[in-house]
Image (cartoon, rainbow, N blue to C red):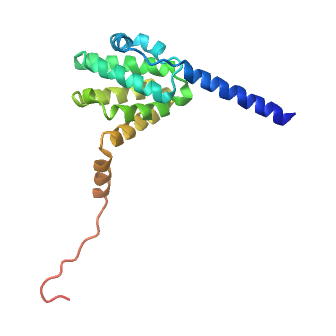
């Protein structure tokens, strides 16, 4: 009897998961553009999305928001609104994973490369909006962004160059 109940509950969970994933419909360009102008619309676009799908949608919304040409202060506020709307639409247990996936997605953003201050704005919004997991979210975003944008090699080289090196002996003529 217990095995039958276990099998039934597993089947129900699997069906629910597949149904949830199947419910996600990628947003249209018009919906993405509207969410870039009004981040309050983002939650509806993320309905039924997996964390990976949500990161891709949020990346696209951020790219469109960057194209609006907002001043620096407006850009910071818009990034905070977008991140806040995304975090509100996603399960709290997945926020750190989402931040890492968003960092990976944003690493290839051409729009982001043209506005380097936006990286700090996104990371700051994750830290500020993440509550007790904000620092972990900021770290996950930063590490993933660094790797995706090709900066991880530089980070490793910097880390290695900061180590204290032992003195090297120089041999002079006549010393063996």
Q: In the displayed structure, does residue 161 sit left or right of residue 88?
A: left
Image height check: is 175 above or below 107?
A: below
Instruction: Give the x, y percent position of residue 160.
Output: 31, 57
The one nearer the camera, 48 or 160, is: 48
Quadrant of image for the N terminus: top right
Q: Residue at x 51, y 17 (%)?
A: 47
Instruction: Give the x, y percent position of residue 156.
Output: 32, 52
Q: How many marks?
A: 0
Q: Residue at x 43, y 37 (%)?
A: 140
Q: In the displayed structure, does residue 10 sit left or right of residue 56?
A: right
Q: In the displayed structure, does residue 70 sit left or right of residue 45?
A: left
What is the residue that sits farthest to the right in this orientation?
Answer: 1
Question: In which image quadrant can residue 23 be found?
Answer: top right
Instruction: Give the x, y percent position of residue 161.
Output: 27, 57
Q: Residue at x 28, y 52 (%)?
A: 158
Image height check: is 108 above or below 78?
A: below
Instruction: Give the x, y percent position of residue 46.
Output: 48, 18
Quadrant of image for the C terminus: bottom left
The one nearer the camera, 51 or 135, is: 51
Image height check: is 169 above or below 65?
A: below
């Amino acid at each position: 009897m217990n095995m039958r109940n276990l099998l039934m509950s597993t089947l129900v969970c699997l069906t629910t998961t597949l149904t949830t994933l199947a419910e996600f419909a990628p947003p249209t360009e018009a919906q993405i553009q509207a969410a870039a102008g009004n981040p309050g619309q983002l939650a509806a676009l993320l309905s039924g999305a997996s964390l990976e799908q949500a990161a891709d949608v949020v990346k696209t919304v951020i790219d469109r928001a960057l194209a609006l040409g907002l001043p620096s202060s407006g850009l910071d506020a818009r990034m905070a609104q977008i991140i806040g709307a995304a975090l509100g639409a996603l399960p709290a247990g997945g926020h750190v994973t989402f931040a890492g996936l968003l960092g990976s997605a944003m690493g290839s953003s051409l729009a982001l490369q043209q506005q380097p201050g936006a990286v700090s704005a996104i990371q700051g919004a994750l830290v500020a909006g993440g509550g007790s997991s904000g620092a972990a979210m900021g770290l996950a975003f930063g590490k993933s962004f660094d790797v995706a944008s090709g900066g991880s090699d530089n980070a490793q080289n910097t880390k290695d160059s900061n180590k204290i090196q032992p003195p090297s002996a120089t041999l002079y003529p006549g010393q063996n």
